[in-house]
Amino acid sequence: RRILLVNGPNLNLLGTREPEVYGTDTLAEVESLAARVAAEFSLEVRAVQSNHEGELIDAIHAAREDCAAIIINPGAFTHTSIAIRDAISGVELPTAEVHISNVHAREEFRQHSYLSGVAACVIVGCGVQGYEFAVRRIAALLGASPA
Ligand code: DQA
């Protein structure tokens, strides 16, 4: 079985973008971390990153065909996108929402997530380790046991 890992706008810059907020690991490192942890449960990861809202929505829709769950960091679309929320609701796959930074300790406009109300869990402020926690939580929700 497969997990769709979705990273939204600006997360392609991970490692160099505001490292004091987001750390120094690159997106490629995050994606391989997720794949490594998923493999512990015999799960695969399909990693997608886009700066375009519609592409993220298309990837979420496509997951309905061949994925059992979704892990998503929608970046700033977290705080703006009803369309991404509706896509997650529409595909009815268990979804973990991840934020690298503690959005609650930051600007007011980062405190609201359109996604959280339809997410199975929300992991905030754990750095890139949050992606690992998300994989482990999704594995538990899927009843996947360690390989
Ligand atoms: C983020 C938090 C968002 O507010 C921000 O726009 C991002 C990254 C995080 O991972 O902490 O792009 O989702």
Image (cartoon, helix red, strand yellow):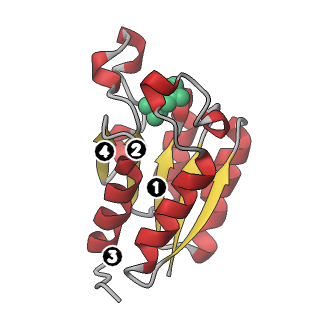
Q: Earlier in the sequence, mark 4 or mark 3?
A: 4
Q: CA distance from mark 4 to mark 3?
A: 17 Å
Disc 4 marks a residue whose amino acid type is: Val
In percent of the image, x 60 and y 47: which residue is there?
27
Nearer the observer: mark 2 or 3; the answer is 2
In percent of the image, x 31 and y 40: which residue is there?
126
Q: CA distance from mark 4 to mark 1?
A: 10 Å
Give the x, y percent position of residue 93.
44, 64
Q: CA distance from mark 2 to mark 3?
A: 18 Å
Q: Is residue 13 above or below residue 93?
A: above
Q: Secondary structure at mark 4?
A: strand
Give the x, y percent position of residue 81.
54, 30
Q: Is residue 95 above or below residue 124?
A: below
Please give the residue where the numbered disc 2 appears in the rendered image.
98
Q: Are marks 4 and 2 in contact (CB under 8 Å)?
A: yes
In the rendered structure, the answer to whether residue 105 lies left or right of residue 58 reads left
Give the x, y percent position of residue 125.
31, 34
Residue 109 lies in quadrant: top left
In percent of the image, x 33 and y 76: which residue is there?
142
Q: Secondary structure at mark 3?
A: loop
Give the x, y percent position of residue 74.
53, 38
